[in-house]
Amino acid sequence: MPKVVTRFAPSPTGHLHIGGARTAIFCWLMARHYGGEFHLRIEDTDLERSKQEYTDSILASMRWLGLDWDGPLNYQTQRAALYNQYVDRLLESGQAYWCSCTPEEVEAMREDARAKGLKPRYNGRCRHRDVGPGEGHCVRLKAPLSGKIVFEDMVKGTIAVDVSELDDMVIRRADGMPTYNMAVVVDDYEMGITHVIRGDDHVSNTPKQILIYQALGLPVPTFGHVPMILGPDKQKLSKRHGARAVIEYQNDGLLPQALVNYLVRLGWSHGDQEIFSLDELVKLFDGGSLNAAAAAFDPNKLQWLNAHYMRSLPVEELASLTMPFVAAAGFPDVSPEQVEALCPLFRERASNLKDLAAAFRPLLVSAADLATADADLPKVAKALTDEACAHITALRAELERVDFGDAAALEQAIQDYVSGNGLKFKQVGPPLRAALLGYIGGPHLHEVMHFIGREETLRRMGAERLDSLKARIAAAGL
Ligand code: GLU
């Protein structure tokens, strides 16, 4: 097999969205699987909508996803002269011609075809008129008059289009700029692309591009058109479905490996396997097994996968990824050691880094800043009976004697208090959680105590803290 060269060709008219990201991942995986090359090309010819900030953002998202590219970045706006050399070549060989028809005239031809029940098309008027260059003249490809364009799509199978469906397309506009399809063909040829994987919104461009390859006598690459990603309701994917730009997932604390794993499975499968490491994907993804049917986006599955990757990361790595989120949650001075100690306490319960960092709050604020959310208040009120408060006070006295540097000793002290007084754990556990954390839930109590330390634990179990909790309960009328 000759060297496999793929490319991703985003238009910088917005941030990288999950549909584009998935295409990029497929192209990258295929190149890496075959030990080939993966190129990146910025299709910025829409001058009004293209912005450098979007190019920067797309590149940042590619890097974050781990999709490195080979060779230089190509910007289409810098390559117009190159494209026009190929247009000139077609003019010289008689495969293209100058056309002086005005837009109004072309529209009239289309109208005419429509009226006859035919596909609206340019009628080839300038084909034999030998018009030559001039003000307002464009260049058109001389398309064959009959026959079929047939190609074997990697995803969709055989696709055949009758050339009568196409007309003599413009390859260079009257303003001298090459058209989109012309640019793409020249780029893909010049970049040595062997496999073009892209969204199936481009499938109608492919026969036109094949005509250009044929006219230039260039080898036609293999095409693969992947179906759009749909929402869970099978409608076009949108924000309403929780689908967002890659950068938004990053800001919400998703792990890139979770997003890559999720997106790959959304259009490709390997048996029933759901979880793949990147190495495994590179090994398995050979460009086959791409689903022709559109897949539906499922935000819950993405969260599930992310939770899986968060649990499987080494704790130091999870901690270092969580650090910026801790700072953003309002705790810029927390040390890496502290975050490393906190991560194992909460990671089972969080499905993204942002939630994980937010969960640290009760362990990082001082007793006076502990808050109880309205939603948690009824449970807190139920747990914090007078009897429960008396247990907290009595346990507090026992804890004075315990070494807080030893989490196991703290656990033992709580156990001893419960069993020594003939109690059930639930008579002590929930009210103690309310006192220490402000809600009923969270990590093991002895781990919380071990982290916040003796002074803070005793403060949170003290009369002042219990009174303020009771006042909050009373104020809510509970
Ligand atoms: N620039 C096109 C897009 O963003 C991709 C074209 C292609 O892959 O050929 O949809």
Image (cartoon, helix red, strand yellow):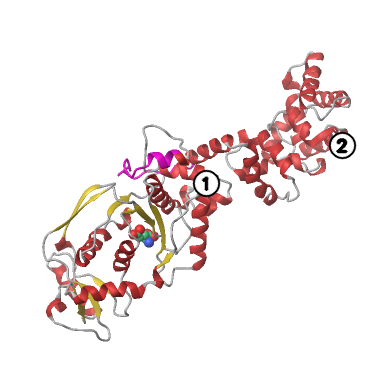
| Residue under pointer 1 | 256
Q: Nearer the viewer, residue 456 or 270?
A: 270
Which residue corresponds to the image point at 77% horizontal and 27% vertical from the top-left? 407
Is residue 45 shown above or below 233?
below
- For residue 409, what is the image quadrant? top right
Q: Nearer the viewer, residue 418 or 472?
A: 418
Is residue 422 shown above or below 414?
above
Point out the image quarter for the C terminus: top right
The crowding category of the residue bearing disc 2, from other C-alpha atoms within 10 Å (few below 14, some 14 to 19, many at least 20), is few
**Horizontal and vertical percent position of residue 355:** 62, 43
Along the polypeptide, which appears first: circle 1 or circle 2?
Answer: 1
The mark lying in front, picked from 1 and 2, is: 1
The amino acid on which the numbered mark 2 sits, given as a three-letter code, is: Glu
Is residue 459 shown above or below 184?
above
The kind of secondary structure the magenta stretch mainly shows is loop
Q: CA distance from mark 1 to mark 2?
A: 45 Å
Q: Nearer the viewer, residue 260 or 85?
A: 85
Q: Nearer the viewer, residue 251 or 30?
A: 30
Which residue corresponds to the image point at 15% horizontal and 74% vertical from the top-left? 124
- For residue 459, what is the image quadrant? top right
Query: Can you see residue 107?
Result: no
Residue 402, numbered circle: none
Query: Can you see residue 307?
Result: yes
Read off the magenta span: 280-299
**Horizontal and vertical percent position of residue 426:** 72, 21
- Taking the image as shown, residue 248 lies to the left or right of residue 18, namely right
Q: Is residue 389 magenta?
A: no
The secondary structure type at the circle numbered 1 is: helix
| Residue under pointer 2 | 464
**Horizontal and vertical percent position of residue 225:** 31, 51
**Horizontal and vertical percent position of residue 344:** 66, 34
- Which residue ends up furthest to the bottom in the rendered image? 135
